[in-house]
Structure formats: C-alpha cells, structure tokens
Amino acid sequence: MEGFILVFVVMALALVAMGVKSVTQGYEYTIERFGRYTQTLSPGLHFIIPIVDKVGNKINMMESVLDVPSQEVITRDNAVVQVDGVIFYQVLDAAKAAYEVRDLERATLNLTMTNIRTVMGSMDLDELLSERDSINARLLHVVDDATAPWGIKVTRIEIKDITPPRDLVESMGRQMKAERDKRATILVAEGDRQSAILRAEGEKQAVILDAEGRREAAYRDAEAREREAGAEAEATNVVSIAIKKGNIHAINYFVAQKYIEALGQIASAPNQKVMLMPLEAANVIGAIGGIAEIARESFGENSTKSALSINKEA
C-alpha cells in the first residue's frame, strides 16, 4: 500500500513538472496539442496540460545576424566579381516562423544570395563599386517583402566586399592614373591660360597708361607752344608798332636778338669743338641801347633812367 502511494506521488509530481513551463526572456514557445498548434507562450511562467500539450518550437525573438558566404556574380558588362555580405533579421511572429517555413535561417540565406545575384547582375561594374548604398536598399526591399509571410522582419542587408579579378583591378588602376594625369594636364593648361590672360591684361593697362601719359604730355607741350607763340606774337607786335613809328632802336633790338640766337645755335652744335670768330661789341651795345629806348617809350621816363643806370653798371 505504501509503495502504491509512493508511485502515485511520484507520478503526480512528474505531471506537475510537465505542466509547468518557464519561458526565458527573448524567446517564445509554440504549444501543440496532439500535434496541432494551439498557442504561443511569451516569457514568464506558464501552465499547460501534461501529456496532451507539449512545446513544439522554441523561437528566438531577438535580432539575429547571418553571414552571406562569398559567391561569384556576373555583372551586366560581363565582369566576374566575388561578393559577400551580412543579413540582420528579427522574428515577429513565432507561429509563422515555426510553421510557415522549414529551416528559417537556411531559407533566408538562400533567398538573399539569389537576390544578390539578381540585383547586382543587372548593374555595371562601375555602378557596383560606386552605388553600394543603393544595392543594399534594393536588396532589403526585395528580401523583406519575400520573407514577410514567414513572420520575420529583415532589418538590414549589407554588402561587405566586392572583389573584382586581379587583371581587372590592374586595368582600373591604370585607368585611374590616366584620369588623374588628364585632370593634372587640364589644371596646368587652365593655369597657363589664366596667367596669359592676366599678363595680357597687364600689358593692355600699361599701354593704356602710356598712351594717356603721352596724350597728357602732348597736350601740355601744345599748351606751352601756344603760350610761347602768343608771347612771341605779342613781342613781334610791340616791335612792329615801334618800327612803324620809325623807332630805329626797335629794329636794332630785333636784329640783335636773332643774331644772338643764331650764335647760340652755332655754339651748341655737337660737331663744334672750338669756335673763333670776331664779334662787334658796338652792335651788341647798340642793340642794348635799342632795348633801353623801347623800355623808355613803354614804361616812362623813370623806368628808362633805371634801365640806363643798369646799363652803365654793366
């Protein structure tokens, strides 16, 4: 009797243990009754019917990552590249993840690899190397839509490495070097062009300033000649009036002035080193006397006396 009671107690404890389920944080359990899904247990302590109910799948609800193995992709311009990447996803519906697809990770991985070949195969090599963000966005959109019935959310797909063949890398290096040399040549030519333009502008400004200076100098020379001609005309007019009045001294003054100017030109000639010629002092004194007579007639008696005293002192 005691043995029967002991067996009964043990079986009761076993049934209670089978009916108590503790779900850890980050996981959800699916419950099956006679092989059919009935409910999902969230994190915490739960009770189920022993023997009738059982745990079907333990689903990880945390965000997970899958490595996409390297594979060959043929681009639109027939370049063969090696591509790998990573996938980030999270289960949102444990029942769908457990019962809508078999081997969720393998299915997600193969679906991603297939779409990588499809998306990258429709692009040129230059686009693959320069538009990686666009590739990631297109892959994310396609894979997320395809995996939505499985109860998961693909949060991110990143292409890690795109490796072209060695000969293609060398060709790209030569192309890059040629492009840089081209840009350097263009920059040098542009610099020479700007330098030539600035130099021409400087020469133009110098010519303009020189022309303006010559114009100003010519204007001032013309003005000086005009004033000199006016003074000469005034002096000639005065002498002409004196000659008209019969003043012989004015004639002597006029002839003496031209005589002295001629002597000055002869003396200043560059081919004349020594000049010997007789000079008649009386004629020069007569000319000075003529000047005094003109001054007496023009300025009056007082001025004439002053002029005579100056001549005597001389």
Image (tube, grey):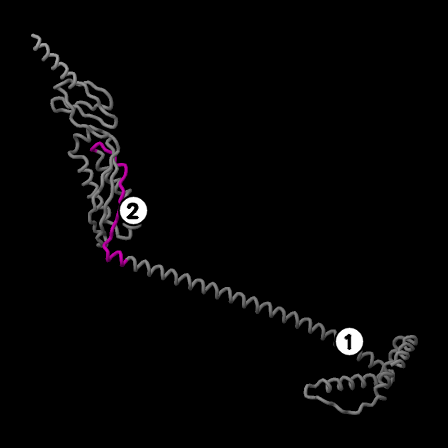
> Residue tagged by mark 2?
132
- Is 151 inside the magenta-drawn segment? yes
Q: Which mark is residue 231?
A: 1
Please indicate, yes or no, whether residue 234 appears anywhere in the rendered image. Answer: yes
Image height check: is 289 above or below 125? below
Q: Which of 4 and 95 is in front in this view?
A: 4
CA gap between label 1 and label 2 equals 93 Å
Q: Do the residues labelled 1 and 2 touch (CB within 8 Å)?
A: no
Q: Position of residue 202 (x, y in %)?
A: 54, 66
Mark 1 surroundings within 10 Å by alpha-carbon count, few (fewer than 14), some (14 through 19), many (20 or more): few
Q: Where is residue 38 in the image (x, y as percent from the top left)?
A: 17, 22
Query: Helix, strand, or loop for circle 2?
Result: helix
Q: Position of residue 314 (x, y in %)?
A: 87, 81
Q: Residue at x 89, y 80 (%)?
A: 313
- Is 129 inside the magenta-drawn segment? no
Please indicate, yes or no, whether residue 243 appears anywhere in the rendered image. Answer: no
Q: Give the range drawn in magenta.
A: 149-171
Q: Which amino acid does label 2 sit on?
A: Arg
